[in-house]
Amino acid sequence: MNRRDTIKAGLAALGGRALGGVGAPVSPHAFGAVGDGVADDTAAIQAAVDAAAAARRPLELPPGEYKVTGTVAVSSDHFHWVQPHGAEIHCSNPSGPALRFAGKTRAMAFLVVEGLHVVREVSAHRQPMIEFGDSNGLSYFAIRNLFLDGQSYLGDGIHLVSIYDGSFSSVMQNNLGGIGAVFRNDPSLNVGNIIFSDWANNASPILFFIQEYYGKAHNLINSLHLDNCKHALASGGKFFPGSAAASSETGAQVVRVASGQGGNFARLDWVVLIQASTGYVWADRVASVSGDQISLTAKLPFAIAPGDPIIVGCWHTVLGGSVSSVELSVPHFERVNGILGAGGRGVLVLSPYLGTNVYRGAYLARSSQQWEIVGPRGTLPAGGVLLHQADEPNNSRNVVRGASLADVESQGNMVRVDGGTCCYWSDRFQGTDVPTGVWHQDGTVPASQSNAAIAGPSGAARPLRMRSRGSLVALVAQVSAPRTAGTLVATVFRNGTATRLSALIDAHKSQWVTTEAPLAMEFSPGDAIDVRVTTDAAWAPAKNDLDVTVYVSQ
């Protein structure tokens, strides 16, 4: 008996109708599946998967409700999963996914999934309904027409582990009680080159979490394209950048935030925790709050040190460390914040729509470089910020282009940069709706100055002539070493007259300071803009480099 006859005989013993005609899909009903939502169909679906892989045929679930209490594993190359309308998998696994597509002991490739519909029936905090890939890698895949209904149970939607060279399209995630899609990478692989398109999510605290820590040092994830992905919550909208006040060891479920910050946290809030020294990032739900002590639902996967960020709020996308070359095209934020960066580099956000209660278009918590937000639309609430950098010097070269102050005017702030190395742009880059230039005092910032001119983008202490109409937006002042005494004020002058846009370095802000412009600080073509510095008699240290970056909207 040849190999094909052996396969036929084995399939016939399990269920004679499984093979059908040549190339016909394999059905779990031939292996004992009931599909009534009551009987446990886990073993029958697994048997059908194994048979389909052996016969090199598609697996197709006829209409019905298939209860899965364990994990059905698909591990063969060139696998085709078909789930037409009316076929549902009911995830009743409290400790893992209903489906796992991964090679187990080797890399898996050439996977096609069409029409996957999964409904969660039990809570499984931070566990997915479906998992794609493992530490060996998954590549060359096309996943389309997915519908995940979390029914508000705790648990994530999809986990992606070390996947590359593939696509996800037409995904709807409804009433998830956890994160929509978590992407992690094994330290032995560099992965990416993935398209995520036409996603919609209406309940998750985070839609995409790229590079979440899961017990291993991660490697690079790059070349990701997120196209037309909408995250809209029915209510809410919140942002608060807290920080740890004390150490918490790996496995702890309690963290203490800085004195007085506890009032910004509430039960059922979701928080993103960042280990600042490594860029490891993790998210969890707040179980309870007592004063400045926050109890988490799960256990910390890494230690927290004093000063490490603990950020409250819901997000469209979170980027952890070792993520690069990411493009978000036409993302939609509604009652969720936009993008949280904890190490992403080379991030382009094209035409984002900022809907109701979006308090941060982007918040760069640490080591986020070369971010560019182009053509943002919508409005911001009072106190909202389009681009917000934390006071961390490894944030740098991050810009906003093509935005008008009229977009946010009296409802919020155009751009804000709290610390970070700002863009060192010369005057030839004017008209980009980003920093118009850096004014610089090299070596010595004397005490007892009064509106002393400092060198501008052209290298001399002379005004910069504006080439078009626009508005002054903000300025950032930085000294190369913290002030030890006295005060320094940097002021923007227009046509030789001081404006209301100035920055003060004093005991409160000893090294970095950001100031946002009052409304209607406009300039016209030909106007002369320069920056002048005033110091008091006590200003120290006497030798200190100074950089002042002026932001404009044109």
Image: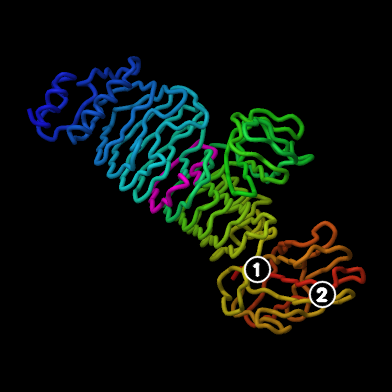
| Amino acid type, residue under disc 2 in the picture | Val
Relative placement, left or right, of 142 versus 157 is: left
**Chief SS of the magenta region:** strand
Asked if disc 2 and disc 1 are in contact, CB closer than 8 Å, the reply is no
**Where's residue 468, x and y in %?**
59, 77
- Quarter of the image for residue 147 reads top left
Q: Residues within 10 Å of mark 1 (few under 14, many from 20)?
A: many
- Vertical side of 502 occupied by 354: above or below: above
Q: What residue range appears in magenta?
A: 186-210
**Where's residue 535, x and y in %?**
86, 71
Residue farthest right in this picture: 537
For marks 2 and 1 on the same chain, the one whose residue lies earlier in the sequence:
2
SS at mark 2 in the image: loop
Q: Residues within 10 Å of mark 2 (few under 14, many from 20)?
A: many
| Residue assigned mark 2 | 445
Give residue 551's mark: 1
Examine the structure image and report whether residue 384 is included in the region drawn in magenta: no
| Image quarter in which the N terminus is found | top left
Nearest the eye: 328 or 109: 109
Relative placement, left or right, of 238 versus 165 is: right
Relative placement, left or right, of 276 versus 100 is: right
Relative placement, left or right, of 78 versus 395 is: left
SS at mark 1 in the image: strand
